[in-house]
Amino acid sequence: MAANEQLAMLVQPDRVHRAVYTDPAIFELEMERLFGRAWLVLGHESQVRKVGDYFTTRMAREPVVVVRQDDGQVAALVNRCAHRGSMVCAEGRGNVERFVCPYHGWSYDRAGELKAAPFSSGYAPGKLAELRLHAVPRVRVYRGFIFASLAPRGESLEEFLGPAKASFDDLVDRAPGGELEVAGGVFKHTYQGNWKLMIENHLDGAHPAYVHASSVAVARNAPEPGKPGEEHYYDIAVRQMRQNGAPESVWEGTGIWATPRGHGYMGDYHDDDRLVAGLGNPVFDEYRARLAAEVGEKRADQILRVTLWNTIVYPNCSFMSQFRQLRIIHPLAVDRSVVYTYSLRMPKAPERMFRDTVAFANVVNGTGSWVLTDDLEVYERIQRALGSGAMEWLYIGRGHGRDVEEGGVRRGATGTSEVFIRAQMRAWLDYMTRDA
Amino acid sequence: MTPEQFLYHEARLLDTQRFEEWLALFTEDATYWVPLERGQKDPYETSSIIHDDRTLLELRVKQMRHPRAHARVPLARTVHQVTNVMVLGEHPEEKAGEVHVASALQVLEFRNERERHYGALVEHRLRKSGDTFRIAHKRVDLVNSEGELDGIAVIL
């Protein structure tokens, strides 16, 4: 197992060793020390509205079931029978009173307590009372989003989120009544590459013009999107793809910030008022009115003036405020990852805004999208090439030395600064080398 | 041409990478739909793996030919196997002259030393056009549409 000094050698201020992406031993250590310690985003409360509602997910190596308990709290239980280790709950979602193991019929309540075990006379008195489904020790909900940590002790969720909390506030505040719900289906896309490749991509303003060159080009030659009242189904897709071809000055002028825990967020690079609610397109008037009815005109203006695009919650989540996309990454192996992509609906906003969200999700996160498939292709090409020992280092030096400290947050000197990757790698090294 | 022969013709165009000719099979008001969820009724309130109207379908074909369409350069080689073709009759919602056809589809894809397999139930709404047909609607329900999938860069 790699000693801390060796790990420290892999991460330098402006470069990262390829082993961080390719070494299976380091991946195992990440599962233990990074995904086993950090707060991970598991989902949203709307996925478990009623007592007994559950959904299955993963935390590092653990299969986990998230369930609404009898007392109304959300719990996360390791989905593994205390007897012989079978998953007690099939993959998916639903509502249960008891989790019953398919192997020998052991049954557990929603809190994970063992309630019944057939042939119980075969056990010493009191033995069965010691057994239960392992409860993930720390689960918290922040503004509807469910977080959990496999570590019994560690920093609080507040400390972990730090300044990135504001991104969640923005996401939720934009919804009239502060209401959001997961809706519209889940894309689950896999790629043959390390999990970091996605997390390092979502704030990268230097890639769209190149990775997405083909979709930008065809969108530019597409029929003009319709004026208000004469819109076409394809408008959202075409508009978004065109924006990916924004000129260099736009990308350089976009804000990019990173926090000490490796989180990061970027400002909005869009100038298309049909894609940004705060820019005054009449399509959003009704939405703005409903927001103002809840919080007043002044506050509604404040909320809509914030124009964030993607936020990364390191290490497992990326979300996008304007079209309410939530992406959770599950590392499967050093070179294999799967990303679950959810859309969030604002139940109190005009219906068409969710239709726009769905159209947006299809073009950006859809498994058959021309945008996403090019991202995945590049992740896979990176993974393949990092197998080469001809060059040992990846270079993360764009903007290095020019980062600006802004009250506990580090801002890139320009919008394409790799400040967020440098912050991620510092956080990575901290998780990987600290004692607990 | 029988509906069955027409479906084979469509598959052949895709497997020989004659995408522009394939596109020309679709009517101006056509839709091409690969739903995300089993039994999905609606493409507007639930996401889709692909939901293209004729405009997006045209752009999709153009994108495939773009020299920097990274996931499609080189283009995958494919075999579309169409079986279990059944004419279900006239489509209830549509005007006369449309034929509703069900089929089963298996696609084998090869690109960059990787093979991928797809299986799907397919429905076509075919509009008679002279002695052949044009596609007014095509729906492809992948058996694993709700599963964990690699990016899909081929046309199903």
Image (tube, grey):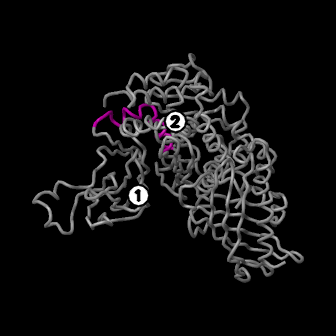
Which residue is nearer to you in this view: A293 or A24?
A24
Q: Position of residue A85 (x, y in %)?
A: 31, 57
Q: Position of residue B66 (x, y in %)?
A: 79, 45
Chief SS of the magenta region: helix
Res A55 label? 1
Magenta segment includes A168: yes
The subunit letter for the residue under badge 2 reads A
| Whether residue A233 is visible | yes
> Image check: A366 left or right of A107?
right
| Whether residue A295 is visible | no
Q: Is residue A122 above or below residue A129?
A: below
Instruction: Nearest to the eye among marks 1 and 2: give it.
Output: 2
Seen as rendered, the residue at the extreme left is A125
Marks 1 and 2: CB-CB under 8 Å?
Answer: no
Q: How far apart are labels 1 and 2 at the CA level?
A: 31 Å
- Callout 2 crowding tier (Cα within 10 Å): few <14, some 14–19, many ≥20: some
Q: Is residue A55 above or below residue A408?
A: below
The subunit letter for the residue under badge 1 reads A
- Callout 1 crowding tier (Cα within 10 Å): few <14, some 14–19, many ≥20: many
> Image check: B140 left or right of A60?
right
Seen as rendered, the residue at the extreme bottom is B89
Q: Is residue A63 above or below residue A276?
A: below
Q: Position of residue A74 (x, y in %)?
A: 33, 52
What secondary structure is found at the residue carrying circle 2?
Answer: helix
Which residue is nearer to you in this view: A381 or B120?
A381
Residue drawn at x 74%, y 40% is: A213
Q: Which residue is mark 2?
A: A22
Residue drawn at x 76%, y 79% is: B99
